[in-house]
Amino acid sequence: MTAPTESTAAAPTLGSEVRIERLSVAYGEHRVLRDVTFTVPAGTTTALVGESGSGKSTLALAAGRILPTDARITGGMVHVGGTELTALGGKDLRAARGRVAAYLAQDAAAALNPVLRVGRQIAEVHRVRDGAGRKEADRLAHEALADVGIADPERVARLYPHALSGGMRQRAIIAMALAFRPELLIADEPTTALDVTVQAEILHLVSRLQRQYGLTVIWITHDLSVVAEIADHVAVLYGGRLAEHTDVLGLFEASRHPYSQALLSCFHSGREAAPKAPFTTISGSPPVGRAPDGCPFHPRCPRADALCAAELPEPRLLSDGHTAACHHLEVTP
Ligand code: SF4
């Protein structure tokens, strides 16, 4: 009889649909994510958009089952292909990390161990998780570095992280995240700290790897130009709730939620305003801690009325694949 494998979780398959159903997360008594539902079709990218405090990073950490210890999933499910990630615990959950869902951190410098050579860090993943021998692990590390576009992988593998540029470090952590060909890649603003040229290279690289390996991607960003570049669909979060979910064209050309429209107006003002003209901003601040009663956006919304302050709007299906949570979707801005 064959020895049992590390996990009983479903084997990864390429191109897996990801379903997030009524996902809720709390830090202590604070509900920071409430009943968020959307689907990411297999092999596509959904961008999670919103200001700081919208819940997008919490959603990403919950979807990858890597929440900090003071946070807990209080309801809902995350399905990746045939695996219900939210049902896993113990060794099954440890095995699923990196194989079913992998997380790509924003800060590549912090994600790498500064006192270990880059190649060793990638090789260790294979040694610890798969029991690969040293030679085989080194070979896999070199292959992984070449796969993310590093031209001289044997030389780069011998370097310490501080000797790498920001773009090279980001490529190295992409190589680590994809070591086990995950079904879902969760990218938490991985290009925010990079200059525009390097950002474009990393976006191009992830798109190529997505096609090559059939990855389904959730990409967190506050930058709508990145959304336009890489996303197939967009989930706009505000105050821990899903404000709007649509395809990317729907966001830029037919957004219906006042918060999405405010984000777009800031974006267009930043790109199109005359030199020295003031940028458009959204007045007020996002809720910190407990969201207000009613619609979480009502203290800042130009369309808010008494109903908005009293009742939480539920997401409404507007057309195939387009939902928005607002009491006054019939109003034209
Ligand atoms: Fe604005 Fe009311 Fe719609 Fe909330 S429900 S987004 S406050 S109009």
Image (cartoon, helix red, strand yellow):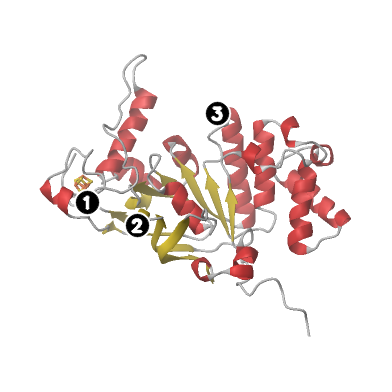
Residue 207 point in image, percent of width and height: 58, 46
Label 2 element class: strand
In this rendering, the label closer to the viewer, 3 or 2 = 2
Mark linked to residue 34? 2
Pointer 2 or 1: first along the chain = 2
Q: Amino acid at mark 1?
A: Asp
CA–CA distance in space, label 2 to label 1:
13 Å
Q: Position of residue 34 (x, y in %)?
A: 34, 57
Mark drawn on residue 196: 3
Residue 330 seen anywhere in this rendered image of the structure: no
* In the image, residue 139 above or below residue 230: below
Earlier along the polypeptide chain: callout 3 or callout 1?
3
Residue 295 position within the rendered picture, expressed as x and y whole percent measured from the top left: 23, 50
Q: Earlier in the sequence, mark 3 or mark 2?
A: 2
State the residue at coordinates (78%, 81%): 2
Q: Specify the farthest residue to the left.
A: 306
Viewer-nearest residue: 61 or 201: 61
Q: Which residue is mark 1?
A: 293
Quarter of the figure with the C terminus: top left
Report whether 123 appears left or right of 199: right
Task: Give the label, 3 or 1, closer to the camera.
Answer: 1
Q: Within 10 Å of the Cα at label 2, are there few (<14), some (14-19), or many (20+) other Cα atoms?
A: many
How far apart marks 3 and 2 lie (CA) works out to 34 Å
Q: How many marks?
A: 3
- Name the amino acid type tagged 3: Val
Q: Is residue 177 visible?
A: yes
